[in-house]
Structures are given as structure tokens and as C-alpha cells.
Amino acid sequence: MIEPPESPCVAVCALDARAGHCTGCGRTIAEIGEWRDATADRQRAILALLPERLAQLAAGLPTMR
């Protein structure tokens, strides 16, 4: 069995309304909601999106949902 990755949650839950992502972890509301029941592969797919989202948020650039 493939071990699921740890949640990217950093306990800074604040939604950037413009981008639609949490400013702490970079996930969308939908991704946060599905995390617990998502497969390990889906969780890794979500994790792969986060570095670019967080970098764009930090730079004040618009992000893709």
C-alpha cells in the first residue's frame, strides 16, 4: 500500500479571495475538502500544484484556479 503524503496544512487558514487559494497551504477550498478522502495519488497531484501557487501568491501575481 502506498503511504499517503502528509497534509500541507500549516494552520494558517486564510482564503485569498482573488486567487481562490489558502494563503497558508495553497490549496483551493475544494482541495482542502477532498484531502482526507483523496487517494494518495490525488494528494500528490494536489501537492505538485502548491509550490507555484504559493510563489505566485507571495509575488502578488494572479494565480490559476
Image: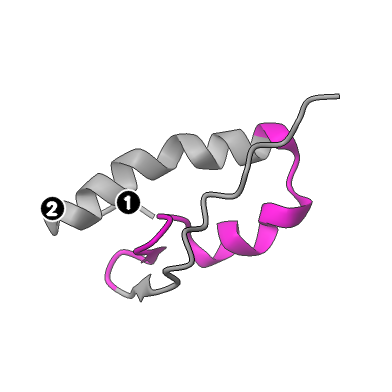
21 drawn magenta: yes
Amino acid found under the numbered disc labelled 2: Ala
Q: Is residue 33 above or below residue 48?
A: below
Q: Tag 2: Cα neighbours inside 10 Å, few (<14), some, or many (≥20)?
A: few
Q: Residue at x 52, y 50 (%)?
A: 8
Residue 47 position, x and y percent, is 51, 39
Q: Can residue 62 be spotted in the picture? A: no
Q: Residue at x 40, y 55 (%)?
A: 26
Residue 29 position, x and y percent, is 53, 67
* Quarter that holds the C terminus: bottom left
- Residue 64 is marked as 1
Q: Is residue 34 above or below residue 15?
A: above
Residue 9 position, x and y percent, is 52, 57
Q: Residue furthest right?
A: 1
For mark 1, give the secondary structure: loop
Q: Residue at x 57, y 56 (%)?
A: 31
Q: Mark 2 highlights which residue?
A: 59
Q: Which residues are magenta?
A: 18-41
Amino acid found under the numbered disc labelled 1: Met
